[in-house]
Amino acid sequence: MMTIKEDICEVKSVHEDVVQRVQGMLPNLGGMVQIFKALADDTRLKIAYSLTLEEEMCVCDVAAVINSSDATASHHLRYLREHSLAKSKRKGRMVYYSLADNHIHQLVKIAYDHATEGDDIDND
C-alpha cells in the first residue's frame, strides 16, 4: 500500500498549459455521472449484467434472478429505463426489458472484464 508521501508530487509545479487545455476540453459530465450512479447499485448492476447475458427478460424473470419481488424488480428496471440504460416493451400481458443500446452493453461488459482481469493473474 502506498503511503501518502509516495502518491503526491514532492515539488508543487502546476503545468498551466496542460491544465488550461484539459479544462477547455472537459464537457458537461452530468450524463456520465447519472450512468455511473445508476450502475453503482448492486441490484441494478446485477440486472444490467443479466441483460448482457440475455437480450431481453420479463420483469418476473428479473425478479427471480435478483431474488426479489416483482415490485422491487420493476422499481429497479424503471430506474434504469428512466436513466436511459434500459428500455421496455409490452408483449400482451408481459413487460420485457433490454439494455438501451450497445453502448450500455459494452460499458457493463468492459467493467466486468476489468474487474475480473486480475483474477486470472492471482490464480496462476
Image (cartoon, helix red, strand yellow):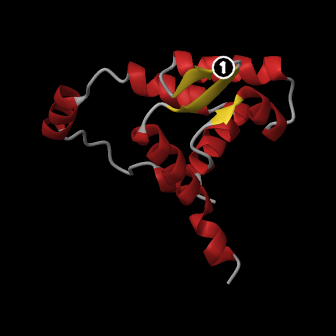
Q: Is residue 99 left or right of residue 23?
A: right
Query: Type of residue at label 1?
Result: Gly
Q: Indicate the quadrant containing the N terminus: top left, top right, bottom left or bottom right.
A: bottom right
Q: Is residue 14 left or right of residue 118?
A: left
Badge 1, how many Cα within 10 Å: few under 14, some, many 20+? few
Q: Secondary structure at mark 1?
A: loop
User: Residue 60 falls in which quadrant of the image?
Assistant: top right
- Residue farthest bottom in this picture: 124
- Compared with 115, 106 (above or below) is above
Q: Residue 20 versus residue 40: which sits nearer the camera?
A: 40
- Compared with 46, 76 (above or below) is above
Q: Residue 40 versus residue 22: which sits nearer the camera?
A: 40
Residue under circle 1?
92
Q: Is residue 107 left or right of residue 121?
A: left
Q: Residue at x 62, y 62 (%)?
A: 116
User: Residue 123 falls in which quadrant of the image?
Assistant: bottom right
- Compared with 91, 107 (above or below) is below
Q: Residue at x 49, y 28 (%)?
A: 35
Query: Residue 34 in the image: x percent, y percent?
Result: 49, 22
Q: Residue at x 25, y 43 (%)?
A: 13
Query: Residue 38 in the image: x percent, y percent?
Result: 58, 26
Q: How many marks?
A: 1
User: Residue 118 falls in which quadrant of the image?
Assistant: bottom right
Q: Residue at x 66, y 69 (%)?
A: 119
Q: Residue 7 versus residue 110: which sits nearer the camera?
A: 110
Query: Residue 14 in the image: x percent, y percent?
Result: 24, 39
Q: Indicate the quadrant containing the C terminus: top left, top right, bottom left or bottom right.
A: bottom right
